[in-house]
Amino acid sequence: LWMEYLYSDEGQIGWLKGYCHPIRFNDLAKNGKIPADVLAKLPPAESYAAAVFPTLDEQGKAKEAISKNWDAVVGANVK
């Protein structure tokens, strides 16, 4: 039941109220389900257009660098 709630309209709007971008945002917006006061508090759409996400290759290289250097920098053993 908890998962059903999280993905329901009410649950997804709850994520928005916490300034998280829920997976069903586009559907909620298309159907006019997002309260105006919640929409007004979100960053402008132009900000999302400028978002950059790392490629899988970049993520793999970052994971390798973190795993290799973590012990020396943080002082904790990572397997």
Image (cartoon, helix red, strand yellow):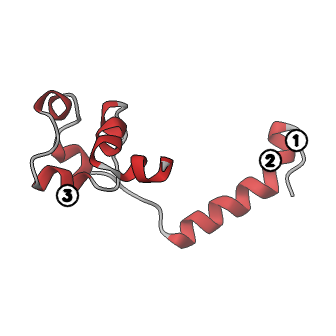
Residue 11 higher or lower than 60, as above or below: above
* Residue 77 x, y percent position in the rendering: 90, 47
User: What residue would you read off at disc 3?
Assistant: 27
* Residue 14 x, y percent position in the rendering: 34, 36
21 relative position to 33: left or right: right
Q: CA distance from mark 2 to mark 1?
A: 7 Å
Residue 33 higher or lower than 31, as above or below: above
* Residue 39 x, y percent position in the rendering: 17, 35
User: What residue would you read off at disc 1?
Assistant: 76
Q: Quadrant of residue 19?
A: top left
Q: CA distance from mark 1 to mark 3?
A: 43 Å
Mark closer to the observer (2, 1) = 1
Labels 1 & 3 near each other (Cβ < 8 A): no
Mark closer to the observer (3, 2) = 3
Mark closer to the observer (1, 3) = 3
Dot placed on the residue nearer the N-terminal end, 2 or 1: 2
Find numbered disc 3 in the image and state the secondary structure of the residue it sits on: helix
Residue 3 higher or lower than 72, as above or below: below
Residue type indicated by callout 1: Ala
Q: Nearer the viewer, residue 78 or 6?
A: 6
Find numbered disc 2 in the image and state the secondary structure of the residue it sits on: helix
Residue type indicated by callout 3: Asp
Q: Residue at x 72, y 63 (%)?
A: 64
Dot placed on the residue nearer the N-terminal end, 3 or 2: 3
